[in-house]
Image (cartoon, grey):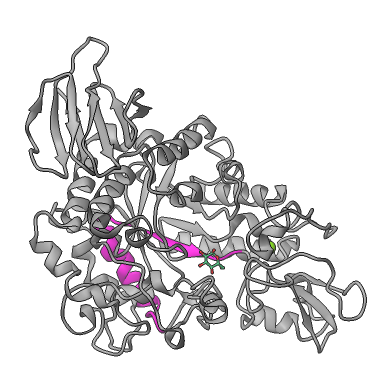
Amino acid sequence: MTGRGNAWWKKGVIYQISVASFSDSDADGLGDLRGIINNLDYINDGTPHSLGADAIWLTPINASPMLDFGYDVSDYLSINPRFGNMEVFEELLDACHGRGIKVIMDMVLNHTSSEHPWFVESRSSRDNPKRDWYVWRDGRSPGRPPNRWVAVVEGSAWQYDDDTRQFFYHAFLPFQPDLNWRNPEVRAAMFDVIRFWLDKGVDGFRLDLINFLYEDVLLRENPRRFGMRPYDWQEHLYDRSQPESLEAAKELRRITDEYPGRMMMGEVYTDTPEDAVAYLGDGTDALHLSFYLDFAQRKWNAGDFRESVEWLEGHLPPAGWPCYYLNNHDLPRTYTRLGRGGDAEARAKVAAAMTLTLRGTPIIYYGEEIGMPMSRIPRKMMDDPIGKKFWPIPVGRDGSRTPMQWSGEKNAGFSQGEPWLPVDSSYVERNMALQDRDPASLLNWYRRLIWTRGKKPALQCGNYRALGGTPKGVYAYVRERGEERIAVMLNFVSRERSLAVPRDERGGSTWRILLSTHGEEGAEIDASLITLQPLQALVLEGI
Ligand code: GLC
Ligand code: MG
């Protein structure tokens, strides 16, 4: 019996795959499910020669016009034909399960594509039975939207429909109309979708914008406030994180719990981390994991990351579990964002050591493990609606979605056809095949971290305790479970730093080097002071 203490979603490492960008098997330039099947050995072949991920999270694979990278679903029960079909998906599921890899699907419950038949019906007339499946309202007066709510991306969150002379609500882009979760038929339909995929055998869901499901029924105005972009000029009291959305998350948990071993992780889109933590409920009755954006937005600074971790550790419900990531398909890649000139590689190694040894479930974004940079995409080649419309500020998200750099061959080994987004020019020197052969590469550092984590329960689910009295620039902590003690020391600066070696209760302080960015693995340390090399990451085991 697997207890809560070692559920796979707690101890495992999740690998996020942007399906369109990972591997293209049929030369149409777009990655696909077969491409993932072909590369499962890379993800986990059961030996330390592979990455060793325990689960893959696939960005949306449901049928979609793909105006927002698949986050605009037109049929929740089918597979996007550009990615494959149901048979291939089942094959992928079986192949993963055969290797002990879990499969997590992205689920977009807040909105559909405007091409979804439900919306096509809904907008067809005011008395269509599906009218109330979306959020339709009269304007305040002719030409004026029902209220002043703004969309996350830009402008009013209300779009006028000429034919039926009402506005529909869209929290994100106008082609992503929000479903009306207050309608019991909508709830039932979406819960059926969830059951359909659970019945099929998927192991979990990544729930898109989970705190956006409900909006205030009275459409009350948000208070104004100062902020960087128009969306931030309002305090989002009434258009997100409504109590009913948390209730829906709890209902989803009840459904998921009917199927043993499944999980839900949620994107709680907010600038208040309290909100994100709230979606864990008491740690057993809502989401299993909630994304913690604060951590992913920190600057390159030991104290900053430590502060972020301590905040989460201090605010989780007792049975709650942290989740850390630095990269995803919406964020600038950290190799570029946190890296600085000649330090980028060393910093990436320190960042990897941190993400993979903290107490919490780590999520790695494809390409992060080989240090793929944030690519500069020429404007005319952009695909992201945000980039196309707003470049250069913001530049859009395409730069973090370029094809996986497998090798130095044509199109970086991603596709035999013309890739949907240009391959980053760094692929010639920076690719999987080269790093695979180099023991000192970033890729092999990720592999060693993940496989070491897999062998050490203290790293998977042990306690976390930050070490005090560390010099500036160093973040150090101890992970403990039973007799097992692991100390992690991360030097964020390009200078040597010395710190006291932690002692156990019995005064013992003998450690063996489990992992080091600077060699000496296996060596014993029996001194009271340890000197970290510039940008060194060190993982020690108490002996
Ligand atoms: C989430 C996704 C993002 C998408 C948006 C709308 O934030 O991560 O990629 O554009 O939701 O569905
Ligand atoms: Mg909504």
Residue 215 picture quarter: bottom right
Please tell me which residue lies in front, 461 or 486.
486
Estimate the x, y position of residue 37 in percent, counting from the top left.
26, 71
Which residue shows up at 71% across the image and 65% down it?
185
Residue 95 picture quarter: bottom left
Estimate the x, y position of residue 463 in percent, counting from the top left.
36, 28
Q: Residue pushed farthest front?
A: 495
Q: Residue pushed farthest top?
A: 506
Which residue shows up at 60% across the image and 52% down it?
270
Estimate the x, y position of residue 444 in percent, counting from the top left.
16, 55
The quadrant of the image that shows the N terminus is top left
102 in magenta: yes
Q: Is residue 326 left or right of residue 286?
A: left
The quadrant of the image that shows the C terminus is top left
The answer to whether any part of residue 446 appears in the image is yes
450 in magenta: no
Please tell me which residue lies in front, 235 or 127.
235
Estimate the x, y position of residue 385 in percent, counting from the top left.
54, 79
Question: In this picture, is 403 found above or below 147?
Answer: below
Q: Which residues are magenta?
A: 82-109
